[in-house]
Image: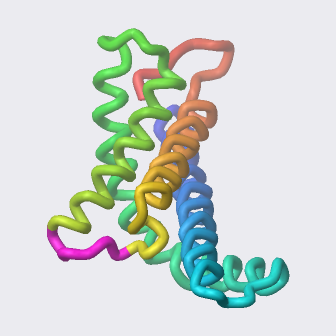
């Protein structure tokens, strides 16, 4: 039963984190376009964001899943040793996982593939999406009756 709970928590976390990260990406790209003089109203912004989530999230989710899996495995091993608490540890692990994923993409490909993460603010916002994903995973995967789970 524990493995099913962990798996469902992970799948839900990847889905939510991916949708959030893509929505953030869309907003940063549109802000850049507005800075260049594009007239992008609220309705168009919502349409673009939903379109991006439908089109980009499934692909981005594969990268996010790989990053979060490694990040959460490491966090599950580290959190009892660092004594920050499980929830905070997984939030830090999720944020760090996305930071590392984006840094590796940049190093390997020579460009940040997620356009909304090309500025320091956009990069930080992607890391916040990862941290929120880590927080969600910590909450969804915890044992019932307040008992801590190693992952």
Residue 54's x, y, as percent?
Answer: 62, 81
The residue positioned farthest toward the bottom in the image shown: 38
Up the image or down, 76 lies above or below 40; here it is above
Q: Is residue 42 left or right of residue 117?
A: right
Of residues 87 and 39, the one nearer the viewer is 39
Whether residue 62 sits left or right of residue 109 in the image: it is right
Residue 43 sits inside the magenta stretch: no
Q: Residue at position x 51%, y 32% from top?
A: 2
Could you say where residue 128 lies in the image, as x and y percent from the top left? 52, 46
Q: Residue furthest left?
A: 108
**Magenta part of the protein: which range?**
108-113
Q: Is residue 151 above or below residue 99?
A: above
Q: Quadrant of residue 26?
A: bottom right
Check the picture and name the quadrant holding the C terminus: top left
Q: Residue at the spot x=66%, y=90% of the render?
A: 38
What percent of the width, then of the height, locates residue 127? 45, 49
Query: Which of 143 and 81 lies nearest the eye of the viewer?
Result: 81
């Amino acid at each position: 039963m524990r493995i099913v709970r962990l798996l469902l928590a992970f799948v839900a976390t990847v889905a939510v984190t991916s949708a959030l990260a893509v929505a953030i990406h869309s907003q940063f790209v549109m802000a850049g376009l507005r800075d260049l003089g594009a007239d992008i109203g609220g309705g168009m912004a919502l349409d673009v964001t939903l379109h991006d989530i439908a089109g980009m999230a499934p692909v981005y989710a594969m990268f996010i899943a790989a990053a979060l899996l490694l990040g959460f495995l490491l966090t599950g091993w580290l959190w009892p040793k660092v004594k920050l608490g499980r929830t905070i540890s997984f939030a830090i692990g999720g944020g760090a996982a996305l930071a590392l994923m984006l840094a590796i993409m940049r190093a390997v490909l020579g460009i940040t593939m997620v356009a909304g993460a090309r500025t320091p603010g956009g990069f930080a916002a992607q890391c916040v999406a990862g941290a929120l994903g880590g927080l969600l995973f910590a909450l969804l995967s915890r044992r019932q009756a307040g008992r801590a789970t190693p992952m």
